[in-house]
Image (tube, grey):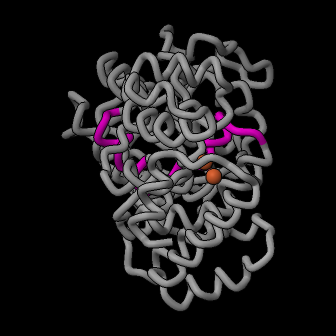
């Protein structure tokens, strides 16, 4: 029996992977497949972020539901949950012991083939298994260090869709993986930081991370949904650096009734609407919190309050009384919130900034 071994980070598994699976079965290259999600690839850069293992595994399971060959595929999780990294030659050696009478076929993408000669003990891999390469469109199919005329190396004549896990982690998910899978990763903030990096400058990213850090402590302390609070913090300023032209255009297209509000507050509505449309955010607490994070409003929920507070008094903000405000918030969120409002009002008065309708209603409602 030909047993396909398909390993990788699957961070996340995408339709390009599924195409590879369907192709090798369809072309009768293998009779059975073992998917081997790895713990951490030795080739990744030090700042590469892996989604939690459980999520990556769940993502694989969701994807395999769409495979015509799912009954012939198993997932081996023993390397995924190991503490240390296992190199491919060791994985192949172990399967060789487990399946002594069968033929192993290591399946890799064309992008991996280019560097295959850098894999540790790659010659051992080639001694113990066949190598089946499935090229993607833009990658060269050759590797001068590997003799692909050898009987056990085959470069398939195919063009696997040019989808990468990297582009998904940066937020380009539509048509690249199942909706259910995307929602799973998105809700757990698996890729929130890499998405927001696509939209904001380094200083705004720092501010965003400060807000995320602070809101996490507030969420835990006040028994709120931590992942939801973190999403509200990650994405609250996603549209902040769009500029006037793009923001006005977006407002005219999707949020017409808010269009003529003062420019500095438009981003709170645009950010909420944008993540709903683009990234499937559907949690009301998240959307509502983002929609009022700059102005506040009357009768705010605890979720709305914690984002408002975290945006105003996170560790990156510096002004008089801020440590006192943090102390109050830490002691009691309601009392702390009122103190933050008082301080905001004083700031507006000192600077003679005209209040928006939301702000006027809020100060009135909370009797500030
Ligand atoms: Fe903001
Ligand atoms: Fe902010």
Drawn side of residue 283 relative to residue 143, left or right:
left
Q: Nearer the viewer, residue 164 or 337?
A: 337
Point out residue 99 in the picture as x, y percentages from the top left corner. Answer: 39, 51
The number of numbered discs placed on residues in the rendered structure image is 0
Q: Quadrant of residue 65?
A: top left
Any magenta on residue 195? yes
Q: Residue at x 36, y 49 (%)?
A: 184
Q: Which quadrant is the N terminus positioned in?
A: top left
Q: Residue furthest bottom?
A: 331
Point out residue 139 in the picture as x, y percentages from the top left corner. Answer: 66, 15
Point out residue 228 in the picture as x, y percentages from the top left corner. Answer: 41, 60
Q: Residue at x 70, y 62 (%)?
A: 347
Q: Nearer the viewer, residue 16 or 174?
A: 174
Q: Quadrant of residue 149?
A: top right
* Magenta segment: 178-201
Drawn side of residue 180 relative to residue 325, left or right:
left
Drawn side of residue 301 relative to residue 17, left or right:
left
The answer to whether 321 is drawn above or below residue 304 in the figure is below
Drawn side of residue 52 relative to residue 116, left or right:
left
The answer to whether 286 is drawn above or below residue 261 in the figure is below
Point out residue 113 in the picture as x, y percentages from the top left corner. Answer: 66, 27
Q: Residue at x 61, y 42 (%)?
A: 196
Q: Quadrant of residue 183?
A: top left
Q: Nearer the viewer, residue 212 or 114?
A: 212
Q: Nearer the viewer, residue 155 or 111?
A: 111
Observer able to see residue 78: no
The answer to whether 183 is drawn above or below residue 366 in the figure is above
Q: Residue at x 31, y 35 (%)?
A: 179
């Amino acid at each position: 029996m030909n047993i396909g071994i398909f390993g990788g980070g699957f961070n996340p598994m995408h339709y390009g992977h599924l195409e590879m699976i369907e192709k090798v079965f369809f072309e009768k290259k293998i009779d059975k497949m073992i998917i081997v999600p790895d713990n951490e690839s030795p080739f990744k850069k030090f700042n590469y972020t892996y989604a939690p293992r459980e999520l990556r595994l769940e993502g694989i399971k969701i994807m395999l539901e769409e495979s015509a060959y799912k009954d012939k595929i198993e997932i081996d999780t023993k390397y995924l949950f190991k503490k240390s990294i296992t190199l491919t030659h060791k994985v192949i050696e172990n399967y060789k012991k487990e399946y002594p009478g069968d033929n192993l076929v290591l399946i890799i993408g064309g992008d991996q083939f280019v560097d295959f000669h850098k894999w540790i003990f790659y010659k051992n891999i080639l001694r113990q298994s066949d190598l089946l390469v499935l090229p993607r469109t833009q990658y060269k199919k050759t590797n001068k260090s590997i003799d692909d005329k050898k009987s056990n190396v085959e470069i398939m004549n195919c063009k696997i869709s040019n989808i990468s896990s990297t582009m998904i982690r940066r937020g380009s998910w539509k048509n690249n993986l199942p909706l259910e899978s995307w929602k799973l990763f998105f809700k757990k903030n698996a890729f929130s930081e890499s998405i927001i990096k696509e939209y904001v400058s380094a200083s705004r990213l720092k501010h965003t991370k400060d807000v995320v850090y602070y809101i996490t402590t507030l969420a835990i302390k006040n028994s709120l949904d931590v992942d939801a609070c973190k999403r509200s913090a990650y994405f609250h300023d996603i549209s902040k650096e769009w500029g006037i032209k793009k923001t006005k255009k977006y407002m005219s297209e999707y949020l017409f009734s808010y269009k003529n509000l003062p420019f500095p507050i438009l981003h709170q509505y645009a950010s909420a609407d944008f993540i709903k449309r683009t990234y499937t955010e559907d949690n009301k607490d998240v959307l509502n919190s983002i929609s009022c994070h700059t102005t506040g409003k009357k009768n705010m929920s605890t979720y709305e309050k914690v984002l408002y507070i975290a945006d105003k008094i996170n560790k990156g903000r510096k002004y008089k009384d801020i440590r006192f405000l943090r102390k109050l918030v830490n002691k009691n969120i309601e009392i702390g919130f009122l103190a933050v409002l008082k301080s905001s009002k004083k700031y507006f008065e000192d600077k003679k900034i005209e209040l928006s309708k939301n702000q006027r209603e809020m100060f009135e409602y909370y009797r500030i």
